[in-house]
Image: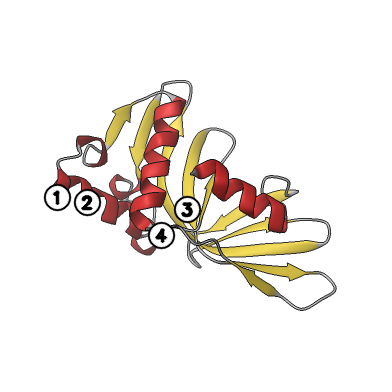
Amino acid sequence: MLDRLAAAHRDRWGAGSADSWAVDLSAGTIAWTFADKRVVAPVQILGSYVQLSGSWRWAWSNEGIPAPVRADADRLRSWGEAGGHAAFTAAELQVDEQTAMTLAAIAVRVTRATGFYRGDHGAIPYMTFGAVTIEPNDGAPSTFTVSIPA
């Protein structure tokens, strides 16, 4: 599922090939910058993964992340509690990268996010995002979203 989402965003606006990206926690957005455009979307932080130690930490357990930007992580915790899914209720887990991606895929499905992005260094943030606004340098903005089947 994450592969299909990534392909849809890559094909429409170049996801994965931006010159840079940044999250604005106070605005609750993620932005990708390209030579010819800027792409912005509402963002939710799911958690972070540290490859060296193989540790995953849910955003709901990180008070440094503002509550509005970790609302989906809070929702996942509640979903885990209701369904007895311990991986979603433990603040930290020892996992490999594939398991971190599996947690993210489940999160996308449960929250019905329309996009997924993963940082690239340090404590790697795993994030979901909503409809993207594509802001070309020389044209009118447009919106793009991907529907996740129920």
Neighbor class of circle 2 (other Cα within 10 Å; few <14, some 14-19, many 20+) is: some
Q: Residue at x 70, y 49 (%)?
A: 20
Lower position in the chain sequence, tag 4 or tag 1: 4
Marks 1 & 3, CB-CB < 8 Å contact: no
Neighbor class of circle 1 (other Cα within 10 Å; few <14, some 14-19, many 20+) is: few
Image coordinates of residue 54 in percent, x first then y, are 41, 23
Marks 3 & 2, CB-CB < 8 Å contact: no
Lower position in the chain sequence, tag 1 or tag 3: 1
Neighbor class of circle 4 (other Cα within 10 Å; few <14, some 14-19, many 20+) is: many
Nearer mark to the viewer, of 3 and 4: 3
Residue corresponding to mark 3? 128
Marks 2 & 1, CB-CB < 8 Å contact: yes
User: Quick one: 48 or 36, which is closer to the camera?
Assistant: 36
**Quadrant containing the C terminus in the rendered view:** bottom left
Q: Residue at x 77, y 63 (%)?
A: 37
For badge 2, the amino acid type reads Trp
Lower position in the chain sequence, tag 3 or tag 4: 4
For badge 3, the amino acid type reads Thr
User: Please, is residue 77 above or below residue 112 in the view?
Assistant: above
User: Please, is residue 113 above or below residue 142 in the view?
Assistant: above
Residue corresponding to mark 1? 82
For badge 4, the amino acid type reads Val
Query: Residue lying farthest front?
Result: 149
Image coordinates of residue 27 in percent, x first then y, are 51, 68
Residue corresponding to mark 2? 79
